[in-house]
Amino acid sequence: MSNSILEGETAGFRQTESAAGNVTVVMSMQQALNRALDEVLAENPKAVIFGEDCGRLGGVFRITDGLQSKHGENRVFDTPLAESGILGMSVGLAMAGFHPIPEVQFDGFAYPAINQIVCQIARMNYRSRGTLPMPITLRVPSFGGIRAPEHHGESLEALFAHVPGLKVVSPSNPHEAYHLLKYAATRPDPVIFMEPKSRYWQKGDVDAADGGSPEGAKVQREGRHLTLVAWGAMVARCLQVAELAAEDGIDIEVLDLRWLKPIDADALVASVRKTRRAVVVHEAPLTSGLGAEVAQLITQGCFDTLKAPVERVTGFDVPYPSGDLEDEYIPNIDRILFGIQRVLEYRRG
Amino acid sequence: MDTLPLPDDSTAAAPPTPDQLRELYSLMTAVRHLDISAVAWQRQGIIPGYAPELGQEAAQVGSGYAVDTSRDFVFPTYREMGVARAMGVNMVEYMSTHKATWHGGLYDPMKSRLAPIQAVVAGSVLHAVGWAHGQTLDGSDGVALTYFGDGASSQGDVHEAMNFAAVMKAPVVFFIQNNGWAISVPTERQVAGGCVAGRAAGYGMPALQVDGNDVVAVLDATRHAFAHCRAGNGPVVIEAMTYRRGPHSTSDNPGRYRSLDEERDGAGEDPLRRFRERLLSEGLADEPFFAQAQASAATQAEDIRAGLEALGPRPGSEMFDLVFQETTPVLQSQAASWREESEHV
Amino acid sequence: MAEISFPLPDLGEGLIEATVLEWLVSPGDQVERNQPLVEVETTKSAVELPSPQAGKVVRIHGGPGDRINVGEPLIVFEVPDNTAGIVGTVPKEEAPKRRVRLSAVLDED
C-alpha cells in the first residue's frame, strides 16, 4: 500500500492559469518539497538523499515519499540511526563528487551532529583552499507548533548562522519551499534548509515556472507604516497580524527574510526606510537570536529615519516547552500586536 | 559472549519465588493493559501521542523488577513504561509526558530512581556511566541500569559509554531491547554483525543475549548482571531479543514498511500468553488469578485515565522558574512581560 | 477525511474466495493494525483476518454466509487527509484571535 505524494500528482492538483499565462498548482508544503527533491534527483545524477527513514518509509513527514521507488536505492537510502554519522558521511560523499541532501529527522537531532556540521562541513572548502567544496543541502524539519516531544521543536537558525561557512534558509509557504529547495540543492556550498514543520500541511499556490529570484528576502505584503520581519512559520502569523492591524488603520509590510545567512540587508533597509518602523518576530529565544542581527542591520541602514528602536517579539530564554505550554512560548498575535504598539507609541526624548 | 562469572552473592541471583512470579505476571498484565489503553486514549484525544511498547512487556518488567530502588538508578528512553511500572513509579506522573504536560514527566527522578524520560536516542547512556562512576568514587554499591534500543546502538555515544564504563570498571548494566525495528529500519539494516551484545567483546566486558520475551530469563539475566556489577567487576551488556509489535508511535503506519506476515513471523510468541501458560503448567496460578490480574489491570488503567484527564496544564510561569536554580534578570523580565501580554493557561 | 479500501487478501494455496463467518468489527469502530477484523472460512480452514490498517471503519462488505472473491472489497477505513509526522499533531488552522487593539497618531513627517 502506498499513498505516495508523487502519485497524488496524477490524482490531480487543482491547476489555475495566471494572467501572465503561468500555471499554478495548489499543493501543500510537503508536496512542494517532495516535488522539488524529485526534480533535483532527476536533473542531477550526483544528487543523493539519505537519512533516518528517508527511504522505504519516505521520511517521517513524507517529504521523500516515493523517491526511493522512483529513483532507486542508490539515490535515496536509509542510514543507521546516527546523526553525526549522517553528516560526517556527507563530507566524504561531497569529496567524492556527489551532492548529498541529508535529512536530520528533527531539529533537536542536529545537536548530535553539530561537531561534523561546524568543524567539518562548514570548513572544508576553506581548509582545502577551495579545492574541496561542500555542496551539501541539509534538510532539517524545524521550529515548534505541533505538540511534539522534547527536541522536536527547536529553532537552531542562530546557531547555524553564527558558523562561518554555512548558509541558512527557511521557506514560509509551498511556493517558496519549492523554489528555495531547488535553488539550495544546486548550490556549491553547504546550505541548512530549515523546513517549518507546523506549515507542512498548509496548502498554497505553487507557480513552478516563475519563482522570481531565489536569493535574498521577499516582501510578502506591502505596507506603509511598519515592517514586520519574519521567517519560516512566523511569516504566516505576521500576515495574520497585518490583516488585524489593518482593521485599526495600521498598514503593515511583511518582509519574509527567507535567507538567514546571508541576510538581505538591502531589502531590510529598503523596507524600513519606507515604513520607518520595524518589529522582528522569531520563535527562537530572545538572547543572541537572529532578531538582534536584524535589528542591528536596520539600525545601521536606517538610523536617521527610524521612528523608534527596532522591537523584537520572540520565544523566551527557556528550553522549548511541552505541548501544553507551547502556545505560551511561540510569539502569539497579541504579543506581536503589543510589540507593534510599543513602536507606534514611541516618542523621542 | 554469553559468559558471566557466577556472582559471589548467590542469593542475589536466586530464582524467583512463586509469589514473585505471580507478581511479575500481574505487572505484565497491567503494563499490557495500560499500553493498549494509551493507544485508545490517543485515538480519543485524551493524549496527543504515545510510543507503544506492546510485545516488550517481559523485557521491561523483568529488568525493571530487578532494580533495588534503595540504591540503584535507572536511565530510560521514551519507551520504558513497563520499566517505570515495575519500579513503582506513579503512572499518572509518568504518562504526563505523553499528555504533553512536561517533557521529562512529572515524577520525581530522585525519589523514584528513574531519570527523566529522554527523547534523544542514546542520550542518557553516558549519564549512566557517570552516575555509576560516582558510586565507585563514593564507595557505594548502587548499579546504573541504562536502556536503549537496536537503533540507538548506532549512535557514537553508546560506544563511548561502553568504552568509558569498561575502562573505569563502572557498575553499569547496558540493557538493550532489540525490538527489531528503529521506526522503519529493521535490525539487519541497522546493526552490523547482527547483534549488539557482540560488541561487548570489543570493550572487554561480558554480555548476555537473552530471550526478551521470557520474563524469567530477563529477570535472571538482570539479577546476575547487577550482582556482577555490585561485586566490583565492571559493566555488563544485556541484549534482550524482543519485538516491537505495535507502531513506533501512534501516528506511525507500519503498513508502509512491513507486512502483517512479517510482523507475525518476527514477533514470535506473545510474552504474556507464554508466561501465563508457564504459570498454568507449573501449577503456580489458576484462572481466577488471571481474571483477578486482568480486572486489577483494568482498574489501574481507569484510574490512570482519570488522573490524566484531571491533570491540567502546568502553570506557564514554570517555563521561567525551572530554567536555572539561580534565575537571571533577563529571565525575570521576560516572565514579567509574558505575564502582561499573554492569556495564560 | 479520505477513504481507504482493502480487498480480501490472497489467502495462499491457490484459494480464490472465502465465506464470511462473523464480523468482529462494525462501521464506526476504531480499530488498530493487527486487530482481528473478520472470521472467514475457506475450503481449507476458518481464519481470522487481522487489520492491515489503524483507523475508523466506514464500511464492511459481506454478511455472514456471503462469499467474497480474493481481490474484492472487504473493508473500508476512514483516514484523515493529513497524517501527523512520527510525533505530534497536525496544527489546526484557526481564525486569528486578538485582544490587543492598536492606536497611533501617524504623523507623516
Image (tube, helix red, strand yellow):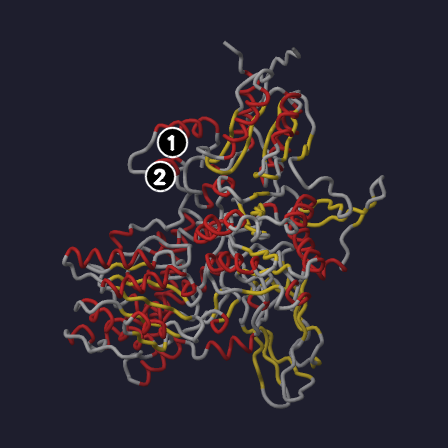
Q: In which quarter of the image is the N terminus of chain C?
A: bottom right
Q: Report if residue B291 is visible in the image.
A: no
Q: Which amino acid, mark 1?
A: Leu
Q: Report if residue C42 is visible in the image.
A: yes
Quick check: A259 above or below B54? Answer: above
**Res. B331 mark:** 1
| Relative horizontal placement of residue A83, taking residue B112 as reference (left or right) | right
From the top left corner, tell me how far across and down residue B39 is, in percent: 48, 61
Quick check: A3 above or below A197? Answer: below
Q: Which amino acid, mark 2?
A: Val
Characterize the local packing of mark 1: few (<14), some (14-19) or many (20 or more) Cα atoms within 10 angstroms.
some
Q: Distance between the residues labelled 2 and 1?
A: 9 Å
Residue B339 occupies quadrant: top left
Contact check, label 2 and label 1, Cβ < 8 Å: yes
Using the image as rendered, state which of residue A149 and residue B299 is in the foreground.
A149
| Residue placed under numbered mark 2 in the picture | B323
From the top left corner, tell me how far across and down residue C19 is, in percent: 66, 82
Using the image as rendered, state which of residue B140 and residue B295 is in the foreground.
B140
Characterize the local packing of mark 2: few (<14), some (14-19) or many (20 or more) Cα atoms within 10 angstroms.
some
Quick check: C97 above or below A36? Answer: above
Disc 2 on helix, strand or loop? loop
Residue C10 occupies quadrant: bottom right
> Chain ID for label 2?
B
From the top left corner, tell me how far across and down residue A172 is, in percent: 63, 41
Kindly give the residue lying farthest to the top in the view shown. Answer: A349
Q: Which residue is drawn at 31% across and 64% down?
A: B163
Query: How many labels, in total?
Result: 2
> Chain ID for label 1?
B
Pointer 2 or 1: first along the chain: 2
